[in-house]
Image (cartoon, helix red, strand yellow):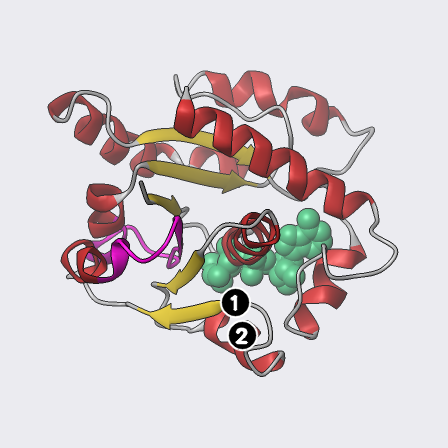
Amino acid sequence: MSKIIAILNQKGGSGKTTLATNLARCLQLGGDRVLLIDSDPQGSARDWHAASEGAYLSVVGLDRATLDKDIQAIKGQHDWLIIDGAPQIENIAVAAIKCADVVLIPVQPSPYDIWSCADLVEIIQTRQQVTNGQPKAAFVVSRLIKNTQVGREIREILEEYALPVFQSCTTQRVAYVTSASQGQSVLDAEPKGEAAQEIQQIAAELQELCHG
Ligand SMILES: Nc1ncnc2c1ncn2[C@@H]1O[C@H](COP(=O)(O)OP(=O)(O)OP(=O)(O)O)[C@@H](O)[C@H]1O
Ligand SMILES: [Mg+2]
């Protein structure tokens, strides 16, 4: 059964594309058939794909409000369809919420980023109320800086939104930037560093959430 994972947050720069590209590649390296869907009209995932001349993943652009319907036609051929969200909360994100099995919300540990999730969380929870809890949703802390107060407190603060928060997170690491510039994931660098472990842990938590 294919799973649709939407990575959403209307806040620009929250880490959506970084999480989408790395998670997609991680699941693919695990032996699954993965399609990365770029729903952002900016086309960052398509730019990432072009930087490697398409060496790793299949990426398609579906950046219309008809995303939920368009995805149905291609769904069956893949184990995972990972949607890289756009930095807006209107029609494209709403369509992604409608078709997703799981929504992941990358959020940076900063008060502005935490506050700005409120509208997205409300849309997801309203949807869950009419669809028997679908889609499942969880926060993934992004670009954590270790040994900072907000870094220690972020999980507790996010729990006030009444959505689960992944135990695993990405921390602030150059590996995410250098791998992206070559159209790669952090798992393609040798030797694999701690960033690769972070992504593998997030992927494992995602699988648990899907099957739980
Ligand atoms: N864990 C990390 N460590 C270091 N840099 C990171 C990390 N995660 C993301 N970045 C960098 O932060 C910037 C924003 O990340 P990204 O493009 O993934 O966010 P986004 O939510 O997709 O942005 P947009 O809203 O514009 O689509 C990028 O330059 C990216 O390389
Ligand atoms: Mg992006």
Up/down of 208 relative to 60, above or below: above
Q: Can residue 114 be seen in this view?
A: yes
Q: Quadrant of the N terminus?
A: top left
Residue at point 41%, 25% (across, down): 211
Q: Mark 1 touching mark 2, by CB under 8 A? A: yes
- 136 vs 80, nearest the viewer: 80
Few, some or many C-alpha atoms within 10 Å of disc 1 (few <14, some 14-19, many ≥20)? some
Give x and y (percent) for residue 113.
51, 40
**Three-letter amino acid code of the residue under disc 2:** His
Give the magenta range.
74-93
Residue under numbered circle 2: 49
- Whether ligand 2 has any atom under 8 Å from the Cβ at mark 1 is answered as no
Residue 183 coordinates in the image, percent (x, y): 63, 72
**Observer-nearest of 140 and 73:** 73
In what element is the residue under mark 1? loop
- The residue wearing badge 1 is 57
Quadrant hosting residue 176: bottom right
Task: Name the outermost residue toward the left.
Answer: 130
Residue located 25% across and 43% down the image: 97
Task: From this view, report whether residue 89 is shown above or below residue 101.
Answer: below
For the C terminus, the quadrant is top left
Q: Report whether residue 170 is seen.
A: no
Which is nearer the N-term, disc 1 or disc 2? 2
**Label 2 secondary element:** helix
- Residue 139 placement, left or right of 118: right
Instruction: Give the distance between the C-alpha atoms of the residues marked 1 and 2, in whole angstroms.
Output: 7 Å
- Residue found at x 69% / y 75%: 182
Above or below, comparing residue 8 to residue 77 in the picture: above
Q: What residue type is labelled 1?
A: Leu
Kindly identify which numbered label has been placed on residue 114. none
103 falls in the magenta region: no
Ligand 1 sits in which quadrant?
bottom right
